[in-house]
Structure formats: C-alpha cells, structure tokens
Image (cartoon, rainbow, N blue to C red):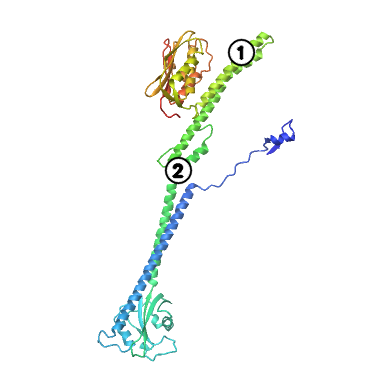
Amino acid sequence: MTTESAPGTDASDTALFPTMVLRGPLPEPRQRRRIPARLLITAWVVLLMAAVLALVTVITWRAVDAKVGERVDRALNQEIGEFQEFAQAGTDPESGAPFTDVPTLLSAYLAHQYPDDSEILFGWVGDAPGSAHGTGGPPADGDGRIRQGQEPPFDLSAEPDMVAEILGAPDARGRTQTPAGTVEWQRIRVVLPDEGADGWFVIGYFTQEDREVVASTTGTVALVSAVGLLAAATAAWWVAGRVLAPVRLVRQAAAHITEEDLTRRIAVSGRDDIAALAEQFNSMLDRLEGAFTEQRRFVDDAGHELRTPITIVRGHLELMGDGPDERREVVRLVTDELDRMGRIVEDLLLLAKAQQPDFVRAAPVSLAELTSDIDANVRRLGDRDWRLESVAEGHGDLDAQRVAQAVVQLAANAVRHTEPGSAVRIGSALDRDHVLFWVADQGPGIPAEEHGRIFERFSRGGGSARGDRGAGLGLAIVRAIAEAHQGRVDLRSAPGAGSTFTLVIPRRKELA
C-alpha cells in the first residue's frame, strides 16, 4: 500500500489529506485454527469425569485399606488380650494346677488356640537368638521356640534372624517382610513370679491375602471407572452433537448465504437456548432478506421510473434551438421533468424508510386538532368543494405527521381524479378499537378487480381527469404508513360511484 499526492497539491496538503492507493491484491485474512465446540465439550466432560472417578477410586482404596488395617489391629489386640487374661488366671484349665514355669504356660495356651489361616502364634523362651545373655531357662524344641497349630503361610518362628528382629525391636508392635509377604506382629513379655526364666508371646498376621483383596477391589473399581468414562465420553460426544446441531447449521447457513441467496433457513426443533438461537438466526435472515429485497426493489424502481424523465430531458436538450423563445420553453419542460424526478426520488426514499423501525413515532395526539390541520392543508390542493364531515373527539396513539401525510396523499389522489368544483369529503372518527380517517370523492370510481392492484408501486388507476403524470407511488405510501401503524387502508368504490379511502389505525397497539 502506497500514498501518492493528487495533482495540483503540495506536500502539506498531502500530509493532511493523503490519497490511499492499493498496490496488488488485498491480503487474505489469516485463517485461525479452531477447535470444534463438540470436541471441547466432550474433552471437558471426560476430564471432569476422570477426576471424579479417580477420586472415587482413591477413596475406595483408602477405605478398603483402612478396613484391612482395622481387621489386623483387632486380631492382634484380641489375641494379646486373651493371652493376658489366660496368664493372669495363672492355672492350667485341665489340671487346675498353677503354672510354675513359662514354657508350660505358653504350651498350655497355644494348645487351646485355633489361629486363622493368616495368623501365626508362637512363644519364645529365653533371650532372642544371637543374644549374648542367656537366662538359663530350658528352651523348648531345642531352640527356645514353642509353636502349635496349623501351618501358617510362612513359619517365621523357625527363622532365627526374623525372631531376633521381632524380639529385639524397640517397640512391641511392628512389621516384618517374609517370603509370604508382610507380616504385622505384636509381642508381649511373659514373666512368672519367682521363676528365673522368662519368655515372649508373639502373634503375627500375614496381610498379603488382604492386600491382594484391596488391590483386586481397587482394580475392579478402576476398570469399572474406565468403562464408565468411555461410556460417558461416547454419550457426551453424542449429546454434544445433538445439542450443537443447530449451531452447526447456523454456521453452515452463514457460510452459504450470499446477497443473491438469502432463502436458506434452519429447521428449529426443541425449546432450549440452542433452538432459540436458531430462531433468532432465522429472524435475522428474514430481516436481511427483506432489507436486500427492499434495496433491490428501490434500485429497480428508481432505474425504471427515472429512465423516462432522463430520456425526455436529454431529448429536449439535444433538439434545443438557438431562439430565445425555444430555449425558454425547453428550460420550462426540463425543469418540470427534473421536478418530477425529484418527487419520484423523495417518494422512493419514503417507501424505503417505511421498512425501518423508527419510521413512525407514536405519541398521544388530539384527533380534533389533527383533523383540523389536515382540513386546512387539503384545501390548498385544488379547486374542489371540500367538506369536513366529522371530527373525532379524544386522543389516539399515532404519528401525527405520517397520518397527515397519508390523508393529504389520499386527498391529492382525489383531486387528480375529479373535476374542479367536485365535492370531496374528509373526516375522522373514533370507535372502541380504531381511529378512522377518510377521504371520499365523486370521481369515476375504481373497478373491483383493481382494488388491490392500485396500492402497488407504480400502479396508476384509470380515470384521471387531467392526464395524470404521477409516478403511481401515492397509494403505496399510504398503505406503508397504515401498515407501519399496524393498521390498514379500506377502499369502497365502484365505477361511476366515486371512491372512499379509509385509514384504519388501532387505538392502543404497540407499533413495530
């Protein structure tokens, strides 16, 4: 793009009023990469669902794991409590004799226990394996170990290192890793009064099986969550497609709409906001189509009606002679045609404005004053027997200027189709629902088959008394003013019986 100075200007003028000259074709707008709304909606739904399902999986895992921990604690505490009660009793339940040594106490207790498959119960007499301090007590089974009952998942009591780890731990509760998995244990020291040897009672609980249940439960929840997430994503994709279908149609319709084709519309189904959007888009297309149609009509009408006066003006100017009288006559004829062209343009512009929302501005108007003003204006239109038949009393909501323009137009139409001195009656009336203004003449009348056609643009009814050269826009303007008030124009006429035009306007109705 460059800037050039117009001929006859200096640099200062150029700086103030540059002339922009484009060099080469206009650059094409940059195409932005867009993400489909359907994909965005589905992605957000999947993301939210994934977060919720992940939270549910974690909560489930924590809850089941806590249950396992509670079960282990309950098993350990229960077994320790039962042993303490047995030891405090201090007598053998079979013989009733008091226990005299720790090995007998441990053996008697273990003989009456039936541990679960995941439990191991054993006693230990003396110091832990590898300890440098012995108590001198007789070890059971030759190694200080006392164990009875079914085989556990792993007999850690037979492993000196593991026994030493348990008995040498600073706390009475802990866990140890074994080939059969983790075992959680709890110990209690056993000491008898006046007995030199002491020992230990140990309860162990293998958590591997319970942890596998936790893992299996968590895996099942995760699998169900994954399947649910897939189903939710599929449903979200389908629902988003259904919901956004009108939006997609709006976009496609907007892409195919041109000035030459504004007929495309969107099928509306449903009652949600998307359906409302489609309805509004269709309404917008209706307005655009009406505006473009009115624009084309204005251009066609102007070209059609202005062509004749332009041709007449050009012909007179081309054939104009040199004589003063001939020049004066040509100037008069040309001036008449130019005036006629000006009136045609003004009428066309008025009809074009009739499609705008602010064409009429309704306000409370005194009907008596408005009728009086109309009567004063129409009497200057021609030498007729003007008669004011009726004057409405009260007020009406209407645009006084437009209504007066319409009634004066009807009166001018009556003047064009009647002879001088002919009676022309005007008046106004008010009923419950409408305001009425009418103009009645004694002209040649209008055949019934032309009653609708004469309100169209550039339609000229027959029977003009003076060679009417109007553009045929007067009655079209009257109809446009009436329709802008949400009203109508009634016509009663027959050949030889004159014509009565009545402007019917609703009294209280919201105007477009």
The x, y position of residue 410, in whole percent, is 47, 17
Viewer-closest of 279 and 415? 415
Identify which residue is drawn at 41% across, 82% down.
167
In the displayed orientation, state which residue is furthest to the bottom.
136
Does 48 appear above or below 470? below
Q: Amino acid at mark 1?
A: Leu
Could you say whether the residue bearing mark 2 is in a helix, strand or loop?
Answer: helix
What residue does disc 2 label? 245
Does 494 appear above or below 147? above
Q: Earlier in the sequence, mark 1 or mark 2?
A: 2
Contact, CB < 8 Å: mark 1 with mark 2?
no
The x, y position of residue 299, in whole percent, is 55, 25
Cα–Cα gap, marks 1 and 2? 63 Å
Q: Amino acid at mark 2?
A: Ala
Mark 1, Cα crowd under 10 Å, few <14 / some 14-19 / many 20+, is some
The x, y position of residue 484, in whole percent, is 46, 26
Viewer-closest of 60 and 252? 60
The x, y position of residue 23, in whole percent, is 68, 38
Identify which residue is drawn at 58% across, 17% down.
339
What residue does disc 1 label? 333
Identify which residue is drawn at 42% across, 79% down.
171
In the displayed orientation, state which residue is furthest to the left.
95
**Residue 103 appearing in the image:** yes
